[in-house]
Image: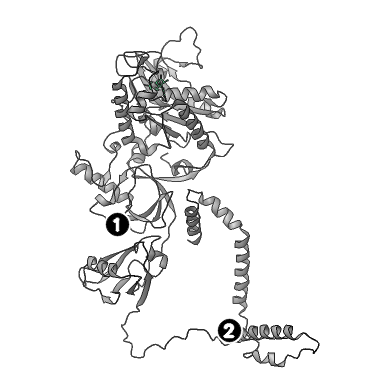
Amino acid sequence: VILSDVIEEVRQSVSQDIDGAEILHSLLNAAWLQSLLKVYECLQRYLRDSPAPALDYSSGLSLEVHLPKQFNVVIILVCLFSIKALLSAHDTIALKDYEPVLPPMPEDLPDDEEATRIVCLVKNKQPLGATIKRNEITGEIFIARVIHGGLADRSGLLHAGDRIIEVNGFPVDGMEPEQVIQVQARSHGTIMFKVIPITERPVHNQTMLYVRAMTDYSPQQDPAIPCADAGMSFRRGDILEIVDQTDALWWQAKKLPSSTACAGLIPSTNLLKRKQREFWWSQPYQPHTCIQTCEWLSTDICSFSSAGFRRSMRLCRRRAHSTTQPSCNTRCPSSCYSALNSPYEEVVRYQRHSEDVHRLIVLLGPSGVGVNELRRRLVEMNPNIFQGPVPYTTRAPRGYEESGREYFFISREVFENMVYHNRFLEYGEHKGNMYGTSIESAKEVLNSGKICVIDIEPNALQAVRTHELRAFVIYVKPPTLERLRETRQDSYITTNYYVNRPFKDEDFQEMEEAARKIESNYWQFFDHVIINNELQDSCVELLTAVMRAQDEPQWVPASWIRPTSES
Ligand SMILES: Nc1ncnc2c1ncn2[C@@H]1O[C@H](COP(=O)(O)OP(=O)(O)OP(=O)(O)O)[C@@H](O)[C@H]1O
């Protein structure tokens, strides 16, 4: 606990996210800690040997000290005073003459009198960091929970389950919790509680847990939260540090990077799942008040995407254009549903070792935003480092095409067999021919030591977020309509009907609408967001993000590092 508190303090003082393991390592190696441990060991040795004083009154010895006359008087005096002080300290310890002397226990104390504790806290601008509840039968007031890192918690004197008898001298038995809070709020400077401490405090056998929120939550709009002010709101994609899971329904957490020492209440996984289910069955058509359910709860995202975020099929883009909506399917692992239905995804800090294969770089965004342009520029910048996977197709090769370079040309039967065995990350049909990107193609690029860069439809996200590909997902977001109009003046769009025609205002509006849909469904899966404003800036940002993904610690699903049977 002390070490994690130290890490937290350091994290706050440098106000950035830091790796706990690194800090812990340097902390344990610190010279001052080693010295402290040595002191501790010495003390332990003395405790074991339990040394006894040679004399009860050693100060008397100083009277017997006779120093030679030739000694300087000042030195003699200083020596004598120091020796006297030392001997007197020795005697105090030998006689166990410690301060303060406590008054004797009153003799007429009734046998059934419970031990009470007076707790005095100095109020500052922070809230107390504790919630109270009333026993409806006895009217007694108890501390319901102590918020991690809050004033009450840091005092170490108040605990969940303690019974409050008085606040600032006012007996509180029988009061409504709101009245107790008013009494407490009236006090200035210090606040005094008289409490009967809980006899058996639950043992907190807790491991630190980090999760990625898969949904939005707002305590102010949740009527079920015990105390809305103690609640913590979060958005999908936020990384949360769960600091207390003692309560089955309400956990305590901090949002990372954390700017406050005090945690907030959030619903536990089970409670949040229950809320989502209840809400979904009772009001399927209304926007939720406290939890913004993602649309993935209602739709089967592994299934066929009919909305089509892109007009051109990514796999056969630009070369041929269909007058029909291209279909797109993704591989659907059996773990897909369970992974998605959890409101929190456990994450760990992961840093790729230099000898490991690179992480797969995945780009996605609404049609026309510039995903393909950015990917193309990245590969062109350094083809020795970046490469796209070679797709498969059932169409016949053209004169200049070579199998394994532009495409792998295979029969429809072989293609269907690959689909059957879930070997595609993404596949689709276009003008009667099948196109697909296989997992093996991506792995082949990664195994060659290069960085594989692909662009996908959002519904293929689950297929790339796996232990073996460890995808780093970059969302390419359109800028404002105004900026789109300004920056795309000389750019061309390819639609189902036209190849390379100038952008129109409807294209920008459609792009914004598609972006809104992608964001409301998939925001929690994005590791990085690039607003594609000026192309040159976006390229630089992309390159930086890609290199950081490979070389710097990132939050990844814990199942990638500790694979479960499902992943
Ligand atoms: N930041 C930008 N500024 C100006 N033009 C851009 C920018 N980004 C992309 N473009 C241009 O916009 C057009 C569409 O880009 P691109 O083909 O990459 O879109 P896309 O996201 O791949 O969409 P689709 O999948 O529908 O083809 C291209 O002509 C591209 O050069």
Q: Amino acid at mark 1?
A: Asp
State whether residue 301 appears in this view: no
Q: Quadrant of residue 438?
A: top left
Element type where label 1 sits in the image: helix
- The answer to whether 202 is drawn above or below residue 354 in the figure is below
Which residue is painted at 36% across and 26% down in the image?
484
Indicate the colouring scheme: one colour
Which tag is nearer the camera, tag 2 or tag 1?
1
- The answer to whether 415 is drawn above or below residue 39 in the figure is above
Percent position of residue 393, x then y: 42, 16
Q: Given the current orientation, which residue lies at the most extreme top position?
A: 399
Percent position of residue 316, x then y: 40, 17
Percent position of residue 353, x then y: 57, 39
**How busy is the neighbourhood of tag 2: few (under 14 within 10 Å), some, or many (20 plus)?**
few
Which residue is painted at 35% across and 35% down in the image?
522
Percent position of residue 225, x then y: 26, 55
Q: Nearer the viewer, residue 121 or 166?
A: 121
Ligand 1 visible in quadrant: top left
Could you tell me how far apart the alpha carbons at marks 2 and 1 are, in whole angstroms?
50 Å
Q: Amino acid at mark 2?
A: Ile
Q: Nearer the viewer, residue 139 or 467?
A: 139
Q: Nearer the viewer, residue 245 or 35?
A: 35
Which residue is painted at 62% across and 86% down in the image?
88
Mark 2 sits near ligand 1, with its Cβ under 8 Å away: no
In the rendered image, which quarter contains the C terminus?
top left
**Circle 2 residue:** 93
Mark 1 sits near ligand 1, with its Cβ under 8 Å away: no
Residue 13, labelled with which disc? none
Q: Is residue 166 left or right of residue 42?
A: left
State whether residue 453 appears in this view: yes
**Circle 1 residue:** 229
